[in-house]
Amino acid sequence: MKIELINKNKDESQASFLVKGVTPAFVNTLRRLILEQVPTLAIEDVVFRKNGSILYDEILAHRLGLVPLVTDLKSYVTQDKCECKGEGCAQCSLKITLEKQGPCVVYSGDLKFADPAIKPVFDNIPIVKLLEGQDLSLEATAILGRGKDHTKWAPGYAHFRNVPEVKVVGDVVDPERIASLCHGLFSVKAGKLEVNQDKLLDYNLAYLDDELGNSVRINLKEDEFIFTIETWKQLSIKDILTESFNCLDSSMDEFAAKIKEL
């Protein structure tokens, strides 16, 4: 297997990799591990002392649960692996408080955390608007969870596609029109359509089949993939990938132990 970084944006919330020498099953397993198994912190329980806002308790609790939180996987464990067996302790849960009086807009940055290392990824997420005389007071608990249980614990989004091969196999009736479909992928020289091979990884060509006709042939390489991760920034892309393979190792160990019991 070979891995090569294709691109990464400035805030490192998205990156694409070229993965060679693997099967579709492998990259799809990696995709599912990222979406379903990599744990992150999110608010799970909310106790309201006062809620004078226009929103019901349940709606506010739901909005709080969707606020992405910076996650420290070295300091916290999931409740199913904690010594307290899920009753709640400093290793598996985090206390959060909020006290606001209107008139104001309550933002994610107003949340107060017992652990100063944990904070919202974004401080400007609006929670609710309080009018004059309206109060909001609550205590929340954040825990580590997995995307398979609720999407609020998913660390981001992952997807992949096969690397395409594009060849001009005949005379193209209107090469300028084809070149305009994907600016930069095709060029026209001396009235003939040419493929800029170094631009192939930048385009998803699945939607072009009907447009290109029989003159341009698109084949997909079966063992080369463009794998893209878009993170919500609770974890870095490196941490997401590392933890996804830790989850895979753990699952294989559990599977091996079950086999021995047979």
Image (cartoon, helix red, strand yellow):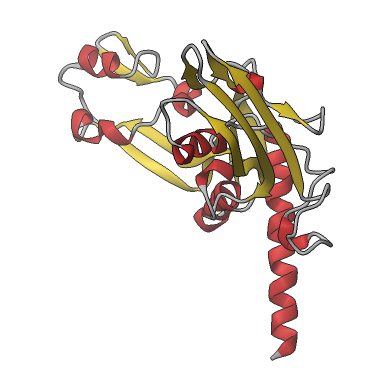
For residue 49, what is the image quadrant? top right
Whether 145 is drawn above or below 84: the answer is: above
Q: Residue at 58%, 16% (x, y): give it.
A: 101
Q: Residue at 73%, 57% (x, y): give it.
A: 79
Residue 175 picture location, percent across and down? 23, 16
Of 173 and 9, nearer the camera is 9
Residue 138 picture location, percent across and down? 63, 34
> Count the marks: how many?
0
Whether residue 106 appears in this view of the structure is: yes
| Left or right of 219, for residue 227 | right
Residue 75 picture location, percent across and down? 84, 43
Instruction: Kindly give the residue lying farthest to the bottom in the view shown.
Output: 262
Q: Quadrant of the C terminus?
A: bottom right
Of 51 and 55, nearer the camera is 51
Q: Residue at 48%, 38% (x, y): give it.
A: 57
Residue 233 picture location, percent across and down? 64, 29
Q: Residue at 28%, 8% (x, y): give it.
A: 190
| Left or right of 62, for residue 79 | right
